[in-house]
Image (spheres, grey):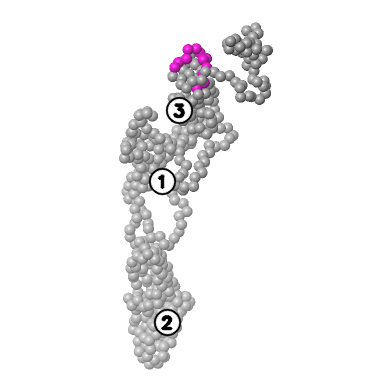
Amino acid sequence: MKQILLFVFLLGNISISFSQVGIGTTMPQSSLDIRGANHLGGVSESDGVLVPRVNALSTAGSTDGQLVYLIADVSTFSKGFHYWDSTANKWTPINSNVEPWNEAGTTNPATSNSDNLYTMGQVGIGTDNPLGALHITTQNSRDVLLFRFIDSPGDDLDIDLLRARGTASAPTLLRDNTRLGGVRGQSFTGSSTLFNPSAEIWFQTEGASSPTSSAAEINFATTPVGALSTIERMTIKSDGRVGIGTSDPTKNLDINGELRIRNIPVTTNSTDVLTTDANGNIQKFDTFLISDINSVVATTNVDYTVSGVNTINNIDLGLSTTVIIPANAEALVVINYSVPMGIPNGTTAQGYYGIRFLRNSVEAPQGSRKFSVLNNTSTVNMVSVSNTYTETITPSPVERTITYTLNGYIEQTGSGSRNYRFNMWSTTDPNFNWGRATLTKQVFVK
C-alpha cells in the first residue's frame, strides 16, 4: 500500500512531456527541469540536487562524465565535485581546467589569494610567451619593486641565487670556475639577436664547493663602444684582493693599466711618499723627506748701547721661526743663521758679542755663538756670526710646535759706554760684505 501511495505522489509532482522531465513544474524546458520551492526566488533548505556522496576515490569510474561528490579531503584529492575522465583515466575535480596554480606541497588547486602557490610551467607577466621560468615585460609601467617591512636591523631583503650540479632531487657539488649567477643589462641593437649585453656582474666559484667551503669571486664586465660583447674589467677575489684590468690580482689592489688620482688635498702634515719597484708594486719611501723650508731676513739694523762692565743676553733681533712636527712623525730640524754684528769705526771695546740661540724660550747652548770684539780704529769693525743647529725629534702621538729665536748677546768687560750694531750695517744697499741677517729652517720628516 505504501509503494502505491509513493507512486501516486511522484505522478503528482513530475510532468513528462515529449521526453522532457519536469520536477516541480508542469512545463519542463529541458530534458530534466528541476524547480525549487520558490522558483527564481530565494533558496529553501530542501532545494538542490544530490549526487552520489563518497569518502574515497580509490576506485576507477566506469563511464566518462560520471559525477560524484567527495565529502572530505583524502589523499591528493580535495573535498568537492569530481568527474571520471576516461581519457586521463582518473577522477578529476571540476575546477581543474580553471585554476593552473596548486597549493604548495599538494596537487590541490589553489582556492584563496592567501595560499602558498606553485606551477610547473614558465610564468609570464606582461607577456603571453614566457622565455624563462619568470619572464616580465613592461611597457611604460613601473619597475620591479621589492619591499620588506621588518624591525630587526639584522634582517634585510635578499635575492638569493642558488646553484648546484645534478638534479633537484639529487644535487651535487660545484666545480671550480662555475658561474653561480649574475645580473646583465642588455641593449636593443637590432642585430640578429635583437638584444646584446652592455654590462654585467656575475659570481663564480673559486675552487670546488664542499661542506667546508663555498668560496667565490665577483666579476664586472662592460661592452666597449663599437662592440657587441662584454670584456671583463674588474675582479674581486675570494681573499678580498681586487684586480682592475687583471683577473689574477697579487695585491689587495692590483691595477694593470694607468692610474690617475684627482683633487688630492694639499697638507703639510703628510709624511709618506709612495714609490714603485720595477714590477709596479707600490711601497712607502722610508727616509727623511723635506716637509718645510723657510727663511727670515732682517729688515733693519738693531743698535744697542752698553755702559761699563755688563752682560746683555736678550736683545730682540726680530729673527724667529716656528716648526710644526706632525703627530706620529719622526723629524730632523736644521737651523742655519748668519748675523752681521760689530761696532762703529773709530771705536774700540773690550769683551764679546754673539748670538744666544733659544728653543721655546730656553737657550740651546749648541746653537749659541760668541766672539771677541773686533777692534779697528780706521774701519768699521763688523763680523758675521753664523752657525748650524740640528735636532732629531722622535715620534709622538700629538702634534708639536717648536719656536727657534735669535737674541743678540753683548758681554762688555771694559769701562765706558759703547755702541753695538746687529743684523746689518745699513738699511740701504749695498751692505758691503756683511749682508743682512738671515735665519733659515729646513724640516725633514718620515
Q: Is residue 21 visible?
A: no
What's under tag 1, amino acid-wise?
A: Glu
* Disc nearer the start of the sequence (2/1): 1
- In this orientation, which residue lies closer to the viewer: 90 or 442? 90
Q: Which mark is residue 441?
A: none
Q: Callout 3 environment at 10 Å: few (<14), some (14 to 19), or many (20+)?
A: some
For mark 1, what is the residue?
A: 258
What's under tag 2, amino acid-wise?
A: Ile
Instruction: Look at 62% across and 13% down and name the residue there.
Output: 9
Q: Secondary structure at mark 1?
A: loop
User: At which x and y percent is residue 194?
Assistant: 51, 28
Q: Which mark is residue 106?
A: 3
Instruction: Look at 34% across and 84% down and name the residue there.
Output: 372
For mark 2, what is the residue?
A: 315
Q: Callout 1 environment at 10 Å: few (<14), some (14 to 19), or many (20+)?
A: few
Specify start and end residues of the magenta stretch as a single range.
59-70
